[in-house]
Image (tube, rainbow, N blue to C red):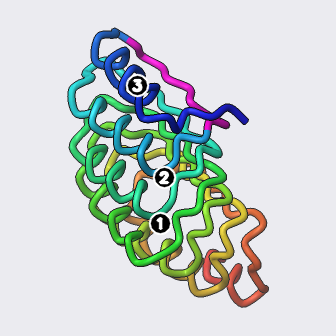
Amino acid sequence: MNEINDENALEKLKYALLHSHLKELDLSFNNIGTGGTRQVATALTQISTLEHLNLTHCHITSKGVHTLFQVLAKNTRLKELVADRNDFEGRRLRVLREFLQGNGGLQLLSLNQCNLGEEGASYIAQGLYKNRRLRTLLLSNNSLGDRGLQYLAECIGSSSLEHLDLSKNQLSNAGVVVFA
């Protein structure tokens, strides 16, 4: 795992992002944490070319995810966001709803192994009601449970999803029946 949690390094990263024409940025497996997430989010407000962002296993907590998703809600250029293996649990997950409702460009969202739980599934489902662009949603290994699955099942018919991964989410027969 690389360490990019030094403030000077984060400022340099932000500067480089602001002066680039990147279409794809992969910061996966870097320990950017909350501070780095804020720097990346600030840069994303001004980058108009980025289409693919990978923040897998970057030690992003609920505070960092709140900042990131607030910014991305207004970004219509980003098509793919992969933020697997981060710890997003907590009350700040409601920002997922606003993110999905406000973002008009995202086609793939991968939040595998992010500790979303039932609450996260509820907010994602609420956001999907108004999102007409998202085609792929990957939510593997998030302990969504049967109730979380029910939240998602209620909105699937009105969403634009074509691919939904709910593997490894502690589902029972009762939970799976809601999709039948």
Q: Is residue 23 one of those drawn in magenta?
A: yes
Q: Disc 2 vs disc 1: Cβ atoms closer than 8 Å?
A: yes
Task: Check disc 3 and report the residue beneath it.
Answer: 51
Local SS, label 2 = loop
Task: Check disc 1 and report the residue beneath it.
Answer: 156
Q: Which of 178 and 75 is in front in this view?
A: 75
Label 1 Cα crowd, 10 Å radius (few <14 / some 14-19 / many 20+): some
Residue under the image location 60 percent in, 41 percent down:
31
Local SS, label 3 = loop
Q: Pick whichever of labels 3 and 1 is earlier in the sequence.
A: 3
- Label 3 to label 1: alpha-carbon separation: 25 Å
Q: In which quarter of the image is the C terminus?
A: bottom right
Q: Nearer the viewer, residue 88 or 100?
A: 88
State whether residue 140 is above or below residue 83: below
Q: Give the range drawn in magenta.
A: 22-30
Q: In which quarter of the image is the N terminus?
A: top right
Looking at the picture, how far across and down is residue 102, in whole percent?
Answer: 23, 52
Q: Disc 3 vs disc 2: Cβ atoms closer than 8 Å?
A: no
Please tell me in which quadrant of the rendered image residue 71 appears: top left
Residue under the image location 48 percent in, 39 percent down:
81
Q: Main secondary structure of the magenta part?
A: loop
Q: Which of 108 and 12 is in front in this view?
A: 12
